[in-house]
Amino acid sequence: MTWETVIGLEVHVQLATRSKMFCGCPTSYGEAPNTNVCPVCLGLPGALPVPNAEAIRLGTLGALAFGCSIHPVSVFARKNYFYPDLPKGYQISQFDKPLATGGTLTFESPERGMLTVGITRLHLEEDAGKSLHDRVPGQTAVDLNRAGTPLAEIVGDPDLRSPGEARAYLVALRQLLVYAGVSECSMEEGSLRVDANLSIRRPGDPLGTKTEVKNMNSFANVERALESERARQVALVEGGGSVTQVTLTFNAATGEVKPLRSKEDAHDYRYFPDPDLPPLVLDATWLAERSAELPELPAARRARFESALGLPAYDVGVLTAEPAIADYFEAIVAAGTDPKTAANWVMGEGLGSFSITGSFAVMPARVAALAAMVADGAVSLQAAKRVHAELAAADDNPRAIAERLGVIQVRDEGALEGWVAEVLAAHPDEVARFRGGEAKLIGFFVGQVMKRSGGKADPKGIQPILRTQLGG
């Protein structure tokens, strides 16, 4: 009998604010250690926290994007534990009265097709600092710049059944939050972190003992870590042992997981309401305003691109992967380009620069003008790609660049007839074979005319002249 894998993910997302959760310190990334700090985030005696209204707004938008029920009253609590990067000796979080509960996330599972996973809860909290093990030889340093950074913790139901499914879930979750404007979700900068809980059981049995895997810096490594932990648990149980509830870390270099410490339960943290913070009360009018503020989300945009613009599913998936890509595509269409043509330009030349720099090198209106030149036969598609490369570095319009490159297509019949005559005179054997019945040689002649013209001849005008001069 096979083992069934049960996975639930806890995702910590840094909210896109300029200041911290309970003080005015900046959240900017990459600053010198321990410079973005103040008495509040350092936990100095007498310093009082004040909630960040923008963090509450963004957390609410995230909860609405998942279709959660927003609770009119939620409570900030103290989560007590002692660790070098936690200056107060507790973390301000939410426990029994979170901001929101009961949402869902729908995505494409690699094994089970379209799948809807439950969202248990979304709550607000502050981040801890960061322990640095590579700055001082033989010692651990602490950087408290992140202490107090606003987070939304999104706890998923244990509905995932494979490491690959967990990765697909994370991709969809990140996309939804980016579309909603909640977070940049950059794992490289620590603005999205994943804790993964995994257990195994025989199908139909109660849930097994779970372990939690931390220290994963990419979605690929989440999948690798879960593969490793699943294999470890199966080997352990089939060898006669039992799984112990522990927290593990993942070594990306070796692909192995190893225990960090025993897994804490909620009672270990001795939660209690923070006496310095009153309950968070959100009235119906404010919540309605937030709901109206929510932009078009990925599922709705995909459906519109397919139904209204007639694009194939593959194109839609690429174009809606990031809001910036979808916005750029729609701007080209709005400038008058056929949707499929616009999609081809974005997925080809456009994404070439976007994947490197995170931005598009050519303005949408100029891409639309270039696409129109191809449609009108002024330049060939290959020549247009050369023009596009020049547009990224020049202020000229597409036609001026095409003229400078000498790629404007020649439609003058006299010029075309001259090039055709020269090609036929230079290839008497091929002419004889064509007249003998090898009709496929027409492609060869077209290519030779294009070569002789330096790519300037209009391909659409070549064939009629060729057939005339070849005798039908």
Image (cartoon, rainbow, N blue to C red):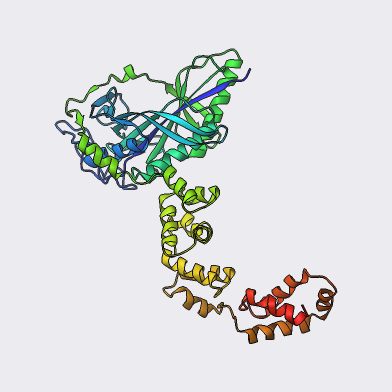
Q: Is residue 227 left or right of residue 299?
A: right
Q: Position of residue 14 (x, y in %)?
A: 34, 40
Left or right: where does residue 235 sit relative to residue 106?
A: right
| Residue 150 appears anywhere in the view | no
Residue at far left of view:
46
Which quarter of the figure is the C terminus placed in? bottom right
Q: Position of residue 132 (x, y in %)?
A: 38, 37
Which quadrant does the N terminus fall into? top right
Between residues 390 and 72, which one lies in front from this camera angle? 72
Q: What residue is rendered at 37% in x and 18% in y?
A: 265
Q: Does the image show residue 259?
A: yes
In this view, 68 is above or below 341: above
The structure residue drawn at horizontal position 82% and vertical position 81%, both measured from the top left corner, is 428
Q: Quadrant of residue 215?
A: top left
Q: Is residue 413 above or below residue 338?
A: below
Residue 95 position by quadrant = top left
Q: How many marks?
A: 0
Q: Quadrant of residue 149?
A: top left
- In the image, 81 versus 24, the foreground residue is 24
x and y percent of residue 46 in the render?
A: 14, 31
> Image height check: is 346 above or below 158?
below
Return the residue found at the far top: 240
- Relative to 343, is 156 on the left or the right? left
Residue 341, given in percent of the width and then of the height, sits at 52, 61
Locate residue 59 relative to residue 278 in the image: left or right: right
Instruction: Give the camera-side residue of 342 and 360.
Output: 342
